[in-house]
Amino acid sequence: MSERPQNDDPDPNEAFDELVEAETDRDPDLAVIEAGSRTLRAQAGPPQGDGIPARPADPEVDRALRAVEDELAGRWGETKLDPSVQRIAALLDILGEPQRAYPSIHITGTNGKTSTARMIESLLSAFDLRTGRYTSPHVQSITERISLDAAPISAEQFIETYRDIAPYVEMIDAQQEYRLSFFEVLTAMAYAAFADSPVDVAVVEVGMGGTWDATNVIDGDVAVVTPISLDHTDRLGETPEQIAGEKSGIIKKDATVVLAQQPVDAASVMLKRAVEVDATVAREGMEFGVLSREVAVGGQMLTLRGLGGEYPEIFLPLYGAHQAHNAAVALAAVEAFFGVGSDHARTLDIDTIRSAFAAVSSPGRMEVVRRSPTVVLDAAHNPAGARAAAEAVTEAFGFSRLVGVVGASADKDVRGFLEAFEPIFAEVVVTRNSSHRAMDPDELAAVAVEVFGAERVQVEPRLDDALEAAITLAEEEGEFSGAGVLVTGSVITVGEARLLMGRS
């Protein structure tokens, strides 16, 4: 890519020195580290926000949005229907196949999909491309699922998009044995909004699986596979190999496959699929990867190896080794999209890459929403995600005592999830979120007692009471004790906690 024009900004070294000198009352080493992180963050320009929209301020717009939300919620979820792309394909056909109007990057995997999608979006936007991003589930607002130019579409545009396609949705409902599902309608809305914009590239996260996922009516130029582990086993299979077979369906003819580190049997399935469709494969640990990472204030400092070479001094404002690996995958995906590694072998502009990563946010993923005591939110919901979260919170925060707040879904491996946190939770407060899928708090407590022991488990059926109880437990060690609270178990739990903690 071409170099960006020089600007007249002050010398970054002078800014760095000024920041260090200003930290006269701080530990000198900590002052240098923090100043370095702040300088890197400044490269991203003004804060972009966290991408979580509040409810519309206009009462009429809010009522209209709630009406659309109610209509969508009245449709079946994906798990109640036989897996098929027949319904969504029929709808998009009468809409003029909007998903063919732009190239796309398609993302599957078990964990890390949304964070990776956000990083890819930030990188593409930094190179002046108009982006559309479709991710799920949402943290707080349904409009988060569809983003244009790195921001959720407005409530007004969400309503308009739904109303535009609603007559065609009704036509397909009448023709098919079953009505279109909630996710199918949202997917059609996303593809239509991207075409209307229009976008230069769409970044699309699967809802579940791959082959039969509603998003899989696109032919992604780049197929991204984040780490595969056991989740949704009732729908996708009971082994990584079986799950990989379903997820490999997003790999299309002549595409480039960006493959995160995988279990051997899952990787074998993906590579076999790539051979069958003449796809090119880029493997983490072989063609690209993380060369080094160091904890920094507010995130971590990385050196990444991309398809075209090394990218040093990348500041990523997210915590955990898993996010560093997501960053390597995202970078390789964008390089592949631009033809790096096939058409040419050179790195993308390093300053643009640094700026893009420094601007990344991923709400609900190791997100700090309060200090003293520190309250962290993380949307981990399966054992692999829990292990990554446990490692990240230990590395990044080093709490002297950590209290967990857990609200999980009944269809998850709750025991495996809790066992991942047992070494780091001093106590756990079990609760529930508002979803009909939420596990009953008493049932969750029974499993927690088996894992932690009765003396370390507290039950608070209401999430607000659970947060208050956990904060009280953390405060028992005193203001300067270094205790913290981690809220986890479900994206819905995290989203509702976020609202209760005043983040909107």
Image (tube, helix red, strand yellow):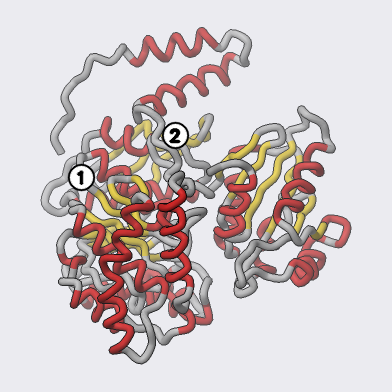
Residue 222 visible, this orientation: yes
Which of these two is toward me, 246 or 301? 246
Q: Where residue 375 appears, x then y in whole percent?
A: 66, 41
Which residue was labeled with disc 2?
Answer: 301
Quadrant position of residue 160: bottom left
Q: Is residue 219 above or below residue 18?
A: below
Q: Where residue 238 appears, x then y in whole percent?
A: 52, 80
Which of these two is toward me, 126 or 301? 126
| Direction bottom: furthest residue | 177
Q: Where residue 209 appears, x then y in whole percent?
A: 40, 73
Q: Where residue 155 appears, x then y in whole percent?
A: 38, 52
Which residue was labeled with disc 1?
Answer: 129
Circle 2 crowding by C-alpha within 10 Å: few under 14, some 14–19, many from 20:
many
Which of these two is toward me, 140 or 15? 140
| Direction front: furthest residue | 60
The residue tagged with tag 2: helix, strand or loop? strand
Q: Is residue 475 above or below residue 183?
A: above
Residue 323 visible, this orientation: no
Quadrant position of residue 150: top left
Quadrant, the N terminus: top left
Front label number (2 vs 1): 1
Dots 2, 1 in contact, CB < 8 A = no
**Residue drawn at point x = 58 percent, y = 46 percent:** 392
